[in-house]
Image (spheres, rainbow, N blue to C red):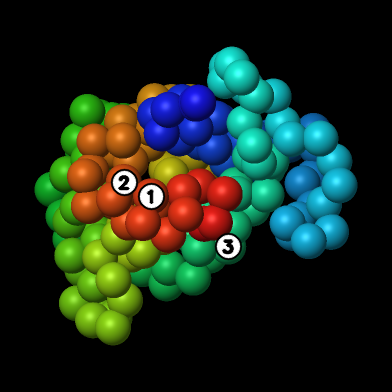
Amino acid sequence: MVTFEVQTACVVQALFSDLFDEEEEVDCRSFETDSAEPARCAADPPLPFDTRVVASHLRQMGDQCNLDFERVSSEPLAAVLQGKVEKFGAAVESAVRRWNDQNPELPYERAFLCVCVKLVKFIGEKVPGVLDPTLLIREINGNARVRNYIEAHGGWVRM
């Protein structure tokens, strides 16, 4: 059985490929119609789902986040935008709190995923070259609430 951490790493790798791979445009996929073989990653045995599909869903979640990061006053966010990626976790938490205040009906865990994806995309566009998938992998794997939420909803395959 492939661990949650390995699954997260594979999903995040697919997300980064979806967000930043300019050579290939990734189509929106669905579990019902995608008959392609699941994307390969460092998982052994292979994952029971296509990470590209999950990445596409995460990207859609990030698109739902309407925070304007340039207008959010947050020291950690400002530091990350200056290339200090060690503040990424604090920047995420600050932005999640702000967005959750605007959308109190949204569960924290879902807001966390939406903001993470949107912030990764924003940083990748504003400060290219400073992002590494391990930042997002660590944030997701290190957040027990988010991990429990994903697992309680059937794992990454159901996200």
Question: Does 79 sit left or right of 151 as displayed?
Answer: left
Secondary element at image label 3: helix
Question: Does 112 sit left or right of 78 as displayed?
Answer: right
- Indicate the position of residue 125 as horizontal and vertical percent values: 51, 44
Task: Indicate which label's residue lies in the foreground, 3 or 1.
Answer: 1
Residue under label 2: 147
Q: Amino acid at mark 2?
A: Arg
User: Which quadrant of the figure has residue 48?
Assistant: top right
Name the residue furthest front. 1
Residue 120 lies, with reference to residue 74, above or below; the image says above
Whether residue 118 appears in this view of the structure is no
Measuring 25% from the left and 65% from the top, which residue is drawn there?
108
Q: Are marks 1 and 2 in contact (CB under 8 Å)?
A: yes
Neighbours of disc 1 within 10 Å: few (<14), some (14-19), many (20+):
some
Q: Nearer the viewer, residue 47 or 27?
A: 47
Residue 46 lies, with reference to residue 118, above or below; the image says above
Q: Nearer the viewer, residue 81 or 10?
A: 10
Secondary element at image label 2: helix
Q: Amino acid at mark 3?
A: Gln
What distance separates the C-alpha of mark 3 from that of mark 1?
Answer: 20 Å
What's the mark number on residue 60?
3
Secondary element at image label 1: helix
Neighbours of disc 2 within 10 Å: few (<14), some (14-19), many (20+):
some
Residue 11 lies, with reference to residue 153, above or below; the image says above
User: Which quadrant of the figure has residue 28?
Assistant: bottom right
Question: Does 51 sit left or right of 149 as displayed?
Answer: right
Residue under label 1: 151
Q: Amino acid at mark 1?
A: Glu
